[in-house]
Amino acid sequence: MEDATKSTHGGETTSDPADSCADNDFGPSVLGTKEYWEDAYQKELETFRDIGDVGEIWFGEESMSRVLRWMDKVKIPENAAILDIGTGNGAFLVELAKHGYSNLTGIDYSPASVELTRNVLQAEDLMDITVKETDFLNCPGELKDFDVCIDKGTFDAISLNPNNTEEGKKLYVQALKDALKDKGFFAVTSCNWTKEQLLDRFSEGFDFVQELPTPSFQFGGKTGNSVTALIFQRLC
């Protein structure tokens, strides 16, 4: 599970901050269900086995590059423990490994995603990366002591789940706190939530570090971003 693929919010800047922080401005979607992602990654797995195509890179390659540039800038050590939450087809794990990072873990609750990722990593001769079939919301004590957690669309998908959406978002925040070391970093990329909404959601237990630049657009006299990318740091 890597990305909700279709933005229902678009990340536009609104004139009223209270409106932008509303946590219920889009409804549930099939994109928030495990069944959807299992079917999607099963098809991508079959395609990869047939023709070697890893499938779509959600948010595009630039979404990975901007996080990698930030990691370079703040000098994240190459041996830092890094968790890719909702690894999807494992594309970000491949890029992290090529960038020199050696202590990588990818998780996804979709068995087909995990199998696809393992196939992709094997094809790239990257056999020292840990890949687990894990539900991030229901794995108490299993994930801990990470220096960096990366999310590229998974929180979006959780937010679209038709069942217990609010509970899922709360569980996500707690799971993130449990997974990160004190002062560990969280890099999140979203196409559904604005900067203000993400700041509100991760206000407890995290410090906001910075916003990463993303493409902007103008419409109706307003400027906005179709994607939001933020860095947080876990409080001690």
Image (cartoon, rainbow, N blue to C red):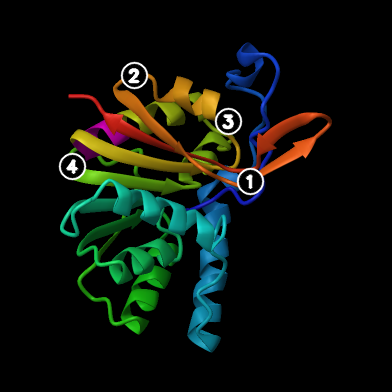
Frontmost of labels 2 and 4 is 2
- Look at discs 3 and 1 and give the one toward the viewer: 3
Q: Which residue is mark 1?
A: 30
User: Identity of the amino acid at label 3?
Assistant: Thr
**Identity, as a three-letter code, of the amino acid under mark 2:** Glu
Kindly give the residue lying farthest to the right in the view shown. 220
Report if residue 180 lies within the magenta region. Answer: yes
Residue shown at 52% from the left, 65% from the top: 41
Q: Is residue 78 above or below residue 16?
A: below
Q: Which quadrant holds residue 103?
A: bottom left
Which residue in the protein does label 4 denote? 144
Residue with the mark numbered 2: 204
Which one is earlier in the sequence, the residue at label 2 or at label 4?
4
How far apart are the two marked residues, 2 and 4, measured between alpha carbons? 18 Å
Residue drawn where x is 32% and y is 63% of the image: 96
Q: What secondary structure is marked by label 3? A: loop
**Label 3 sits on residue:** 194
Mark toward the viewer: 1 or 2: 2
**Is there CB contact under 8 Å for labels 3 and 1?**
no
The residue under the point 31% across, 28% down is 174
In three-dimensional space, the C-alpha distance between marks 1 and 2, rounded to whole angstroms, equals 29 Å
